[in-house]
Image (tube, helix red, strand yellow):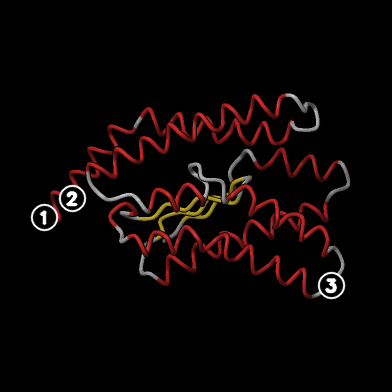
Amino acid sequence: MMKFRIHPVLLPVFIGLAFTGGLSLYAILFTSLLFHEFGHLLAAKFVGMTVRSCTIMPYGGEIQIKDRHLATTPARLAVALGGPTATALLLCAALLFKFPASEEVIRIQMALLAVNLLPILPLDGGQVLSALTRIGGEGVRMRTVLIVHSICFLFAAILILSAGLPKTLPYILLALFLLIQNISVFRFRKYEAAYLNLKLKRLT
């Protein structure tokens, strides 16, 4: 059975919105994140992948898929693009049909798309690049390159955003959160590579 949870880092965001009278924004943001993740889950089901867990994150969410790295490139691309596709559909609906808070919906969908399509891990743009690398030794090497690229990109983003403090503080915190995730993945990359090679040997 798939596990579903909300990452603890989202709680301060929602509490802050509640205290500042942003309950409507909270509802739109949370619904948008759920809709985004539903796109990933629907795509995973469509291509026959098994989803182990789904975690709602500040930038969208993360889904843990059984043997993701052993899946075909088209399947991985479909799952990676499922979330942005759902967000884009919601954006189009808000642009075509005017309703209360439609402007807020449009802004949030545009922000989600802009962030998620950045070519860094673990965002959807980074997952697309990861899916385009080959499975095996070359794929592991390219994934390491992508992780290092993501770390450098986020370091640079934090430095640039620091010039706009305090207005850019939320973006800096998000970049810092992603940076910590990438550093953690980089530290355990050898174990991930060993596990992947073991799975490949069992299949051959």
Does dot 3 land on a helix, a strand or a loop?
Answer: loop
Please state if 59 lies on the left or on the right of 163 as rendered: left
The spot of residue 115 in percent (x, y) is 62, 47
Q: Which disc number belongs to residue 98?
A: 3
Residue type highlighted by circle 3: Lys
Q: Contact (CB < 8 A) between labels 1 and 2?
A: yes
**How many angstroms separate mark 1 from mark 3 (CA)?**
55 Å
Does dot 1 land on a helix, a strand or a loop?
Answer: loop
Res. 58 image quadrant: top right
Q: In this view, does 8 lie above or below 161?
A: below
Q: In this view, does 26 lie above or below 100?
A: above
Near mark 2 (Cα within 10 A), the count class, few <14, some 14-19 or many ≥20, is few
Q: Which disc number belongs to residue 146?
A: none
Res. 170 image quadrant: top right
Q: Which disc number belongs to residue 204?
A: 1
Figure quadrant of the C terminus: bottom left
What residue did someone put label 2 on? 200
- Asked whether 174 or 155 is in front, the reply is 155
The spot of residue 33 in percent (x, y) is 64, 56
**How many angstroms separate mark 2 from mark 3 (CA)?**
51 Å
Residue type highlighted by circle 2: Leu
The spot of residue 106 in percent (x, y) is 76, 60
The spot of residue 180 in percent (x, y) is 52, 30
Figure quadrant of the N terminus: bottom left
Q: Which residue is drawn at 69% across and 36% down?
A: 171
Q: In this view, does 60 lie above or below 181?
A: below
Q: Residue at x 43, y 31 (%)?
A: 148
Please state if 48 lies on the left or on the right of 43 as rendered: left
Does dot 2 land on a helix, a strand or a loop?
Answer: helix
**How many angstroms separate mark 1 from mark 2 (CA)?**
6 Å
Comes first in the chain, label 1 or label 3: 3
